[in-house]
Image (spheres, grey):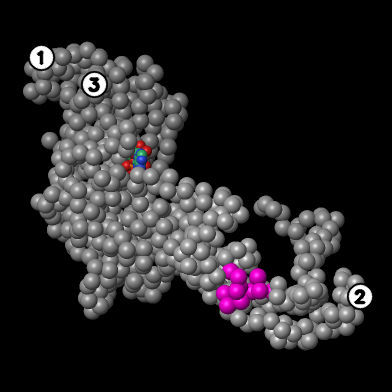
Amino acid sequence: MFPTPIQKASPFVQAGYKLLLPLALFLWLLPLIGVAVTSVRPAGDLAAGNYFGIPSGFAGVENYTAVFRDSPIGLYILNSFKVTIPTVIGAVALSCLTGFALAVYKFKGNLILFFMFVAGNFIPFQILMVPVRDLTLKLGLYDTTMGLVLFHVAFQTGFCTLFMRNFIKGLPFALIESARVEGVSEWRIFRYIVLPLMRPAIAALSVLIFTFVWNDYFWATVLVQGQHAMPVTAGLNSLNGQWVAAWHLVSAGSIVAALPPVAMFFLMQRHFIAGLTLGATKG
Amino acid sequence: MADVSLRDVKKQFGALSVIKGVDLDVKDGEFCVFVGPSGCGKSTLLRMIAGLEDITSGALSIGGKDMTSVGPSERGVAMVFQSYALYPHMTVAENIGFGLKMTGHSKAMIAERTAAAAKLLQLEPLLQRKPGQLSGGQRQRVAIGRAIVRNPQVFLFDEPLSNLDAALRVQMRTELSKLHQDLKATMIYVTHDQVEAMTMADKIVVLSAGKIEQVGSPLELYHRPNNLFVAGFIGSPKMNFLTVNVTAGEGGKAVVSLPGATVVLDAGATTIAGGEMTFGLRPEHVDAKGKGDAQIQATVKLAEYLGSETLFFVTLADGSEMAVKADGLASQRPGDTITLGINAKACHLFNTDGTAVINGDLTR
Ligand SMILES: Nc1ncnc2c1ncn2[C@@H]1O[C@H](COP(=O)(O)OP(=O)(O)OP(=O)(O)O)[C@@H](O)[C@H]1O
Ligand SMILES: [Mg+2]
């Protein structure tokens, strides 16, 4: 078997494994631990220059209440949801359809169309900044969550289509053919055969896009100015004082802001089932 | 119920010609088997009948209606795929009823037909399972159940038994034959297993490289192969072929000089040109005890003792080889000499272009 199970490796390798794994894990999590520790630091620590040392006291309760008291973080989070959820639904739903079309139907230009979806991912979005801002202004979508949603859907659909098309290509094509011979219409084939089998892909993609869009800072700052539409990533900035950076509050706010994607992951976890097509073909 | 007819049907994949003009009539209620070597286009031809592949040229009709460019869903055929293609997220009952449900049949009718199919195929205890929890043979039965609930005019099977073990294959073979008798539907069945073909078929279609070599009943193909290909393809172990010299004898006879013997065949009305030809004789028609119209001496090279029978692979005087099927008590060992008897009535003779000139049909 490859790789060799660690239980069967030499004692030296086993010891190294036991030592290095926690170490690597610690290093990997260090930034997160840093943020978590800072979020419970009293404000005085930061003023005294104690950025990375042991906190002088536990100020978790004060900091987290301050976040909710001093900033409209509730509104920001609501805005983030207003942007993220429609984007996830829009991008995933669209890409289920485009992916199905590109994977199942043979038509002229199929591959070229597919490559165009893929190629869109290679455009660095920074160069789109000015034209997209102009476009949203002209459409009257500037400074609205709707503008962000539309832009994110347009931009995420390319990657989602790549993902979905390849996933559907991996399903046994005989399932579709057999349904066709049974007289099932194409839409119903999509609805009752392909869609249920795409559940793991839909779950994975939803979590991915949710996290991606939730964490977006760039477009949140480019396309939105006012508090009323500001997502939480951009909104956190307002926790800083006008003159001094309040890192302990920003950290606490960040932790709060990071919770929804984590929750989303655990919510979707039971759908990441491998082997859904088990038994479709002879084993 | 319906007949299927193909008129000069061709299939082209780009520049590659896969089906090169097929004319075929499958009668209503007939069990027709397509056999042929791998890659000869059996699956392609079946998929063309199902509507899953376009027909490049030619015409197809099912039940008298032209179906050449009708979509698969409107042909009224049911197909059992080589891979079964069960819907993995549905239970057995849902799998069987899916097509009916999607085409707007009532719940009561779906339940009734599903129950009937399950009873016929002994699937009743499995109705609530998912395909992943079934054995290969059970999956295969579900795939058949899915086909029969729709009461199709024509059943199409693409090597449905090829992945089952030998015992299950024999069992499913008889079950399919029984099903055909019960349903009396037209069935077209693809296989490259000739035992399946011989045991199940009313009519066998032998294909090779996209063309029909011969159509006939199993025994017709066995006794009267039209050409070398069919002669070599049907029958196991394979028919022996020897290159021989032939002269025309008096009174419609062909005199064949075999290594170490001469055998005189009755050519009937056929005129024999003579010269070099291919002589064919099935291993089971060579007598290992030397009885027959001519005797040849041979040396046993290899012997397989199967109990019920013994297979000898022997070398003739000129070095050419032959297989001989003897009864299980034959005791010759490799290295021994053996006298083979040849029954002139069982011999076949083929032209250099492969067409049969004389068919030694023992049934006559
Ligand atoms: N979609 C396709 N594009 C190009 N060539 C194809 C395609 N499908 C089949 N072929 C070719 O057509 C020929 C016939 O294929 P087919 O699947 O009908 O063979 P078969 O007789 O069913 O063989 P087997 O017994 O191995 O299943 C093969 O040479 C194959 O390579
Ligand atoms: Mg095939």
Work out whether B265 lies above or below A12: above
Quarter of the figure with residue B142? bottom left
Quarter of the picture holding the N terminus of chain B: bottom left
Among all residues in the image, which is located at the extreme front?
Answer: A138
Res B7 visible: yes
Of discs 3 and 2, which sits in the foreground?
2
In this view, the mark in front (3 or 1): 3
Chain of the residue on which disc 1 is drawn: B
Does the residue at mark 3 contact the one at mark 1 (Cβ under 8 Å)? no
Residue closest to the eye, B2 or A117? A117
**Residue behind mark 3:** B353
Q: Is residue A164 magenta?
A: no
Residue that label 1 marks: B250
* Amino acid type at mark 2: Ala
Few, some or many C-alpha atoms within 10 Å of disc 3 (few <14, some 14-19, many ≥20)?
few
Type of residue at label 3?
Asp
Q: Element at badge 3? A: loop
Residue A48 is labelled as 2
Task: State which chain disc 3 sits on.
Answer: B
Residue A254 position in % (x across, y down): 71, 74
Residue A204 seen in the figure: no
Q: Quadrant of the C terminus of chain B?
A: top left
Same chain? Circles 2 and 1: no
